[in-house]
Image (tube, grey):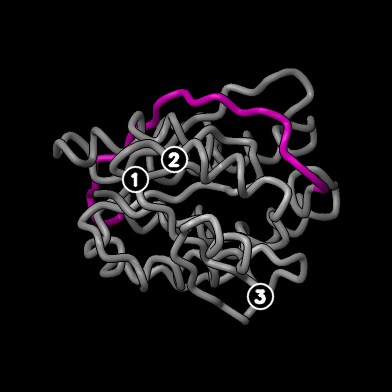
C-alpha cells in the first residue's frame, strides 16, 4: 500500500476524476488547505481519508499529509486533474524496489496545458539546481515518490511553494539517488492558482529562490 498525498485548495471539480482513477494499492490522503468549495467533505464522501491543515501554504498541506501518512513509501500529486493517478506506479515502483530514493514525474505536457511563463520559470530553476547539485532534472515534477520516514528526517522547512525544491536540495545533500520519469500533463480542471497565472508563478519562483538561498 502507498499513501498518495493530495494537497487540496478548492478542487471539488477535479476530485471525483482524480479519486476514481487511483490505482489499486494506492490510498488517497487529501490534505485540505482551507477549501471553501466543499472539497474536504466531498473527499470524505468519495472514500478518501482527509487531514485538515488550516495554515495556508502548499508546503504546509504537503507536510500535514506526510505527517499523517502511514505507509513506508508515499507519493505526492497535484489534485487539479492535470496529472493522471494511473501513472503513479511509474514514479513509485523505483522507490518501492529500492532503485531510487526520490522519483519525480517529468511533465510531458499536452498543447496549452503548461503556460510558457511557468515552463520558463521551471527551466530556470532546474538549470540552477543542476549548477548547484549536478542533478540533470528536466522538471521539478509535482508527482513524486519517496520513503516516508527518510523524507521526514530530511527536515524540509519551507511551508509555501519552496517545498518541492527544498525537498530535492536536501535529498541531494543527503546523497539520495534521485531520478525522473516522463508523465503526462493535461489542462487542469477549474481556475489555476499558481502556474496558470503570472502572479502565481512569480510567487512560486520567489519561494523557490528562498529555498535556493
Q: Mark 3, mark 1: which one is toward the viewer?
A: 1
Where residue 149 sits in the image (x, y, percent)? Answer: 22, 65
Location of residue 211 with respect to 67 vertically, above or below? above
In magenta, the rendered stretch is 173-191
Q: Mark 3, mark 2: which one is toward the viewer?
A: 2
Residue at mark 2 to residue at mark 1: CA–CA distance? 6 Å
Residue at mark 3 to residue at mark 1: CA–CA distance? 26 Å
Farthest residue, direction left: 98
Label of residue 26 in the image: 1
Does the stretch in magenta take in 111? Answer: no
Q: List the residue tagged with mark 2.
A: 22
Mark 1, other Cα within 10 Å: few <14 / some 14–19 / many ≥20? some
Q: Nearer the viewer, residue 100 or 3?
A: 3
Mark 2, other Cα within 10 Å: few <14 / some 14–19 / many ≥20? some
Location of residue 32 with respect to 164 vertically, above or below? below
Does the stretch in magenta take in 177? Answer: yes
Is residue 176 left or right of 16 when viewed as pictured? left
Residue at mark 3 to residue at mark 2: CA–CA distance? 26 Å
Q: Nearer the viewer, residue 36 or 46?
A: 46
Where residue 190 sits in the image (x, y, percent)? Answer: 80, 45
Where residue 157 sits in the image (x, y, percent)? Answer: 46, 73
Residue beneath the point at 41% across and 43% down:
144
Secondary structure found at label 3? loop
Farthest residue, direction top: 111
Q: Which mark is first along the chain, 2 or 3?
A: 2
Kindly tell me whether residue 213 is visible in this rendering: no
Q: List the residue tagged with mark 3.
A: 56
Query: Quadrant of the image for the C terminus?
Result: bottom right
The answer to whether marks 2 and 1 mark residues whose Cβ atoms lie closer than 8 Å is yes
Amino acid at each position: 500500500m502507498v499513501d498518495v498525498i493530495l494537497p487540496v485548495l478548492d478542487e471539488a471539480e477535479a476530485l471525483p476524476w482524480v479519486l476514481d482513477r487511483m490505482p489499486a494499492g494506492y490510498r488517497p490522503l487529501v490534505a485540505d488547505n482551507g477549501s471553501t468549495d466543499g472539497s474536504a467533505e466531498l473527499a470524505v464522501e468519495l472514500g478518501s481519508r482527509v487531514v485538515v491543515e488550516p495554515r495556508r501554504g502548499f508546503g504546509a498541506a504537503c507536510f500535514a499529509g506526510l505527517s499523517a501518512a502511514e505507509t513506508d513509501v508515499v507519493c505526492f500529486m497535484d489534485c487539479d486533474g492535470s496529472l493522471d493517478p494511473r501513472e503513479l506506479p511509474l514514479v513509485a515502483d523505483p522507490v518501492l524496489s529500492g532503485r531510487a530514493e526520490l522519483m519525480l514525474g517529468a511533465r510531458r505536457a499536452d498543447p496549452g496545458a503548461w503556460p510558457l511563463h511557468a515552463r520558463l520559470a521551471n527551466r530556470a530553476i532546474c538549470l540552477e539546481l543542476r549548477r548547484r547539485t549536478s542533478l540533470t532534472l528536466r522538471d521539478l515534477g509535482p508527482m513524486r515518490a519517496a520513503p516516508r520516514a527518510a523524507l521526514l528526517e530530511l527536515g524540509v522547512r519551507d511551508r509555501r511553494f519552496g517545498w518541492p525544491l527544498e525537498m530535492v536540495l536536501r535529498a541531494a545533500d543527503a546523497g539520495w539517488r534521485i531520478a525522473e520519469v516522463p508523465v503526462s500533463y493535461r489542462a487542469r480542471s477549474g481556475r489555476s492558482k499558481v502556474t496558470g497565472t503570472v502572479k502565481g508563478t512569480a510567487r512560486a519562483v520567489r519561494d523557490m529562490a528562498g529555498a535556493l538561498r
